[in-house]
Image (cartoon, rainbow, N blue to C red):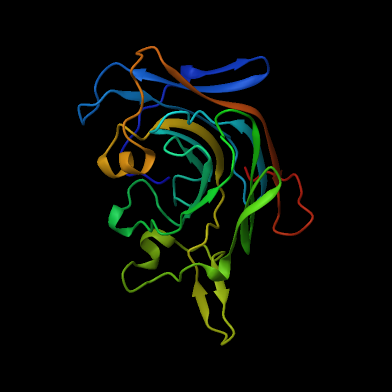
Amino acid sequence: MYCSTAADYNPSAVIVEDSILKISMSLDHSPNEYGRPQGLGSAVSSTRFMLYGKVTARIKTGSSSPGVVSAFIVRNEDPGDEIDFEIVGRDPTEAETNFYYRTPPTISTDLVDYDNIAKVPLGMNTATDFHNYEIEWMPEYIIWRVDGVVIRSLFKNETKDVDFDDIGEGEIYGSDLSDIVVDPGMNRKRKKFPSTPARIQLGIWDGGQGVNGTAEWAGYPTDWSTPDKRYDLEIDFVDIQCCNGVVPMMLVWIS
């Protein structure tokens, strides 16, 4: 989820137990700027970038309380393209899929499009067992899968057109032309479709104790009734198949 407010992360809260990578969130004992106790989130990220391909993460979410957000995303900070899987503790039986186009941390929230989210009921509690979450990202489409089942498909030509009357092309969108499509009338249009190299990231954070809009989305309040309570996002494996834009996919990193 794109969020314009800063979040503190604790790199020491990433451990390996019995071949499972655990990304933990524990209570930060200092109240946040809203006067609320808040968890100190954690995240891991690939160091290399990929441009198109398929990423599968076998995880057990830590979203066992309202407010706890478990995230599996493909994102770059600048220009800020992003593809999301998020599970929020408000309803851990539901997956939220989302994407953003050109949302760097410096962008005004007035320019962020929050209308691309799709919530999908999974019929299972994601915090009690491991499941495979998959993002297939190709030049013309994105597919989200859970345990091999397609839960959402998005085609590039279905996304919104860039409105250059409001935003200058050079300000955010740059000179990259990979998000251009040609319609049946041979008109060139720029589409709001993620199309720049990005890193793979997994993390857990406390949305329930943050700014009101985010807290409402994630579920409020997060359960910190026990000060030493810990929430774990558990990762069995991450499989990355990079692609050069054609099928079959190839193991090619963009460095």
Residue 219 point in image, percent of width and height:
36, 37
Image quadrant holding the N terminus, namely: top left
Q: Residue at x 74, y 59 (%)?
A: 246
Choose top left, top right, bottom left or bottom right for residue 226: top left
Choose top left, top right, bottom left or bottom right for residue 234: top right
Q: Residue at x 31, y 39 (%)?
A: 215
Residue 27 point in image, percent of width and height:
36, 19
Q: Residue at x 63, y 64 (%)?
A: 140
> In the picture provided, is 180 more to the left or to the right than 223?
right
Q: Give the residue furthest to the right.
A: 248
Residue 22 point in image, percent of width and height:
56, 21
Q: Is residue 251 above or below residue 116?
A: above
Choose top left, top right, bottom left or bottom right for residue 201: top right
Image quadrant holding the C terminus, namely: top right
User: Between 148 and 40, which is closer to the camera in this rendering?
Assistant: 148
Q: Give the residue furthest to the bottom.
A: 185
Q: Residue at x 32, y 59 (%)?
A: 111
Q: Is residue 56 above or below residue 117?
A: above
Can residue 19 be seen in this snapshot?
yes
Q: Is residue 147 above or below residue 9?
A: below
User: Between 48 and 30, which is closer to the camera in this rendering?
Assistant: 30
